[in-house]
Image (cartoon, grey):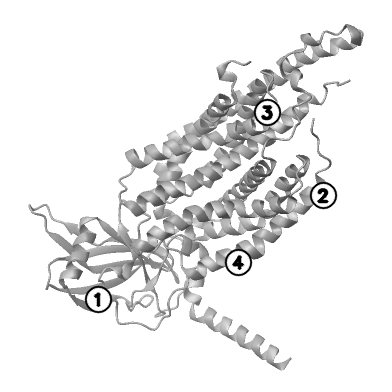
Amino acid sequence: MLQIKALFYLTMLALSLVQLVSSDEHNHVYEEGEEVVLWMNTVGPYHNRQETYTYFSLPFCRGPKQDIAHYHETLGEALQGVELELSGLDIDFNVPVKRTTYCEVTLSEEKAEAFIYAVKNHYWYQMYIDDLPIWGIVGEISKDDPPQFYLWTHKKLDIGVNAKQIVDVNLTSDSKVLIKPGAKVTFSYEVTFKPSKVQFADRFDKYLDPSFFQHRIHWFSIFNSFMMVVFLVGLVSMILMRTLRKDYDRYNKADDVDDLERDLGDEYGWKQVHGDVFRAPTQPLLFSVLIGSGLQLACVILAVVSLAMLVEMYTERGSLLSATIFVYAAASPVGGFVGGALYARSGGRKWIKQAVVQALFIPALLTSVALSVNLIAIGYRASRSLPVLHSIAMLAILGFVILPLSLVGTVLGRNLAGQPNLPCRRWFMEPPVICLLGGLLPFGSIFIEMYFVFTSFWAYKVYYVFGFSFLVFLILLCVTGCVTVVCAYFLLNSEDYRWQWCSFLSGASTALYLYMYAVYYFFFKTKMYGLFQTSFYFGYMALFCAALALVCGAIGFVATSLFVRKIYSTVKID
């Protein structure tokens, strides 16, 4: 008992010491003369944003200060390739530093070639002071013929201060040196502090681009998508209120006639398949997993975007990705419940297999892409390669959080699902054609917003207009639901009862058009090159589109299911 108490108090003491040591960076409040840490993050080619390496993979040298332990990044930071290392530069709060040499490097043949390659490929690097990002260019190319390659050797940091907090940091690179073997390069730095009127809460505003994200085209796209929703809702309402009402009236007139005199040939269209429309879909296990995963992802997107609207997540490195992982794990019962209930209603017996597949489907999909990209990243020695400890952490989250919660949801869904309820066209009424056409309008409602999202992720923009993304996502859900209902009506009216997969694929085909747009964006809107960046782009875009396909497909199935149950609820079967 005494040992347990001692261990408890030692743990609390250690935590308090850690908090005291790092109180400045956590609280962002500095006392006069208190240490300000300059962290070096990554370096890489400007046009390949995701191809990044540790800063000291280039033959830069560190400053003399070495009394701070290595920065331990969070899971979200590790997945985003953040790899902070101490610069070794001595900076104290509100204490100016005149031009000071902190190290010297004699360029060997190998080091000179490394710097020349970096300058030739427009390498840039990133640093952090008090969680504020700073960017700089490694060097520049002269306009001579043949060109000369120069290295910037002096860093001047201008730090804006409001009260006891850092609110602004600017970097000026100076003193370029010709890169050649045998050259002696002297690296120096300079720090100035100046009062600033910028409030701490507004210090990230300089990194945002309102003129880009709040452009009138952006507003017009939202309005255009909203009008599309109004049109589609009106179309679906017309089908329900006019076409179906006429069918109902015609069908109900038969109640006034003797049953023996009814001409069954008078019934046509969607009523002809009333005995088959509630049959279980083919491949019920796979279908239930796809629907459950899609609705789980829809809940995750709604929760994360709503949270991002309330909390400025872009101010903290990796916070959005960390929140997504947490919300996905917490939403595992949703996928398990929906998938388990649908599988049970379809008459499925292998519920344990369904539960395991449901829990592992999205992680397996993610792992298949991430592992391939990670192997290439390891070959490139890029910072995007996932460390072993963080891989173990992801497996632990999967095994001890996601899998149990998904199993709980599956058991609940299976027990609450109830008993199973199993009861020549023109070319444009064929299911493949309907499925392909079904994704056009949903894609049209989001493709302009996708341009802004792509630009923020693949280029150098900070995405902060989560209100726009929330509205666009709601519009996407409405458009997808309406379109799949119309597609299902056309399919049923052509006397084809196989609406389940058609409703899912009609919504999911939106992702096909988005991936085609991603291919266009890569070749015509970016200057990316190289195996690593290309594989990273197309691999993770395929993963993103697969997630979108699951979400839209699941929403399409739910909307169509409600529609089908509604229209067949009043059909009288003798």
Q: Residue at x 59, y 86 (%)?
A: 13
Q: Residue at x 11, y 58 (%)?
A: 148
Relative to 105, is 121 above or below? Answer: above
- Label 3 vs 2, first from the N-terminus: 2
User: Residues at badges 2 and 1 in contact (C-beta under 8 Å)?
Assistant: no
2 vs 1, front mark: 2
Which labelled disc corresponds to residue 396?
4
Residue density around tag 2, few if under 14, some if 14–19, many if 20 or more, within 10 Å: few
- Label 2 vs 1, first from the N-terminus: 1
The quadrant of the rendering that contains the C terminus is top right
Relative to 5, is 437 above or below? Answer: above
Q: Amino acid at mark 2?
A: Asn
At mark 1, the secondary structure is strand
Q: Amino acid at mark 3?
A: Arg
> Is residue 51 visible from the viewing direction of this image?
yes
Residue receiving disc 1? 98
Which labelled disc corresponds to residue 415?
2
* Image-quadrant location for residue 245: top right
Q: x%, y% of residue 538?
A: 41, 46
Q: Amino acid at mark 4?
A: Ala
Front position in the image: 494 or 138: 494
Give how far apart the Cα atoms at labels 3 and 4 are. 40 Å
Residue reaching furthest to the left: 145
Which labelled disc corresponds to residue 425?
none
User: Residues at badges 3 and 1 in contact (C-beta under 8 Å)?
Assistant: no
3 vs 1, front mark: 3
Residue receiving disc 3? 498
Q: Residue at x 50, y 76 (%)?
A: 23
Give how far apart the Cα atoms at labels 2 and 4 are. 28 Å
At mark 4, the secondary structure is helix
Front position in the image: 240 or 489: 489
User: From the viewer's perspective, is 524 left or right of 363?
Assistant: left
